[in-house]
Amino acid sequence: MSHPPAKRPKKPAHVIEKERAKRAGAAETLFLFGLHAVRDALANPARQKLRLMVTPNAAQKLAAEIAASGLAPELHDPRKFNPPIDRDSVHQGAVLEVKPLDWGSVSEICAPRNDAPLVLLLDRVTDPHNVGAILRSAEVFGARAVIAPHRHSAPETGALAKTASGALERQPYMRVPNLAGAMNGLRDMGYTILGLDGAAEADIGALAPTLPQGPIALALGAEGPGLRQLTRDLCHHLVRIPAAAAFASLNVSNAAAVSLYAVTARQPDHIRVGAAGDGG
């Protein structure tokens, strides 16, 4: 007697998202969605735009950006709109196919130019929503770049761009072949590198005012494993964000925002004042 094949267990949502991000990272193009992400991509002259799919309502909201971009939109009936993205993605009637951005080299982007730039280093942070939120914070606090290894990091995806709410078009997000190599390059350029570690003895808020008035890089690891040993070894200082509760910890994107504030608070003029957005 034959038995029907056993059903495969359903994959957790975070596993599906990581697999989708990996496939997107290998693709030559990606699909941005949502009014904020599409509007800012249309307005970015450095972004190579290939195909715009919109509903009439979205086309009206994006009229100025569409006209300036010179791209002929494909108008779709909202009841039959089926763009090539995940069906659960909140696209708001706007989907744009684009080429990934090329920001150039770390040495070009991060070199101090009579200033004290700030850089973020992400060690195996793979969740696109976390990276998108980090890009928003990096832009608010005037970071020169967000750097991550090409492997074991979140590539440009529609989900990352939507969470970044336009910051992906303005905030350099650089994926490098080797994070340790990038860190050595930053050290050679005079950066002081701080590694976030919950077990560190130094408090970032107390240490920040004592640092030399030069460029700073903040290294953050994935939630759980944290920074790899080689990354830790290349940091000048390991620091922690103090917590009221013994077992309290922050999401990596929240930790990035707090750390950025801690190191820029000693240089108030470095911070660009902006308004909070609705994240759409």
Image (cartoon, rainbow, N blue to C red):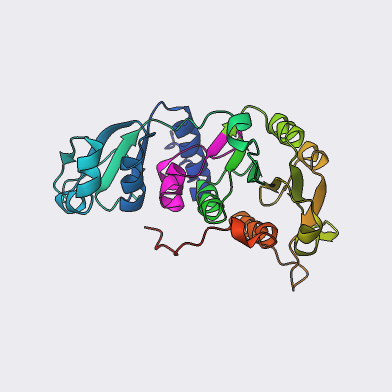
**What residue is shown at x 81% (from left), y 58% (from top)?**
210
* Residue 255 visible in the displayed image: yes
In reply to whether residue 160 is colored magenta, the answer given is yes
Q: Is residue 163 left or right of residue 58?
A: right
Question: Does residue 213 lie above or below 107 as drawn?
Answer: below
The answer to which quarter of the image holds residue 76 is top left
Q: Is residue 247 left or right of residue 96?
A: right
Question: Does residue 161 lie above or below 97 as drawn?
Answer: below
Q: Closer to the camera, 15 or 191?
A: 191
Q: Closer to the camera, 136 or 12?
A: 136
Q: Where's residue 14, x and y in %?
A: 52, 48
The answer to which quarter of the image holds residue 24 is top left
Q: Which residues are magenta?
A: 149-174
Q: Is residue 133 left or right of residue 79?
A: right
Q: Closer to the camera, 256 or 189?
A: 189
Number of marks drawn: 0
**What residue is shown at x 45% (from left), y 64% (from top)?**
276
* Residue 90 visible in the displayed image: no
Question: Does residue 77 lie above or below 230 as drawn?
Answer: below
Q: Residue furthest front?
A: 114
